[in-house]
Amino acid sequence: MSDIPEVLFVCVHNAGRSQMAAALLDHHAAGRVTVRSAGSAPAESINPAVREVMGELGLDLSKEFPKPLTTEAVEAADVVITMGCGDACPVFPGKRYLDWQLADPAGRGADDVRPIRDDIDRRVRALLAELLPATD
């Protein structure tokens, strides 16, 4: 078993909220957390407004793509976070499950997606502080 915590972000289409959360956690954790995202019905591509607002933070999602949710991904994760989109995950003992109620960026422009991104960023930073408490 690895000492590195693994977090899985799940949203139906894996094209917006879960992609932002994964990119933000990966960025802030700087290799100290394994981060994945997936969806039960992956879209063909990531929401363009999501790509734009993440690019504003220097996070390039151009090589990312929506991925299918698998039982193996859930089983491998220590923490599974759904994004308020009603997606259901297989439940395994010993996992921590959270549901973050977030607005859906689908069909919205960058001005409407920025506050969603910023909300996710606050939650990701708080999660990171729980996963990797500061050492004295």
Image (cartoon, rainbow, N blue to C red):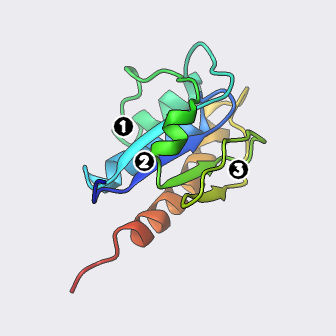
Label 1, label 2: how far apart the Cα atoms are: 8 Å
Residue 136 position, x and y percent, is 21, 87
| Mark 1 vs 2: CB contact within 8 A | yes
User: Which badge, 1 or 2, comes first in the chain's sequence?
Assistant: 2
Give me the residue at 37% from left, 20% from top. 63
Q: Which residue is mark 3?
A: 102
Distance between mark 3 and mark 2 Cα atoms: 15 Å
Q: Is residue 7 visible?
A: yes
Residue drawn at (25%, 49%) of the image: 31
Residue 60, compared with residue 65, is above or below; it is below
For disc 3, the neighbor class at 10 Å (few under 14, some 14 to 19, many from 20) is some
Tell me the quarter of the picture where residue 66 sits. Answer: top right
Which amino acid type is shown beneath numbered disc 1?
A: Leu
Mark 2: amino acid = Leu
* SS category of the residue bearing label 1: loop
The residue lying furthest to the right in this view is 86
Looking at the rendered image, the disc whose residue lies closer to the viewer, 1 or 2, is 2
Query: Of marks 3 and 1, which one's residue comes earlier in the chain?
Result: 1
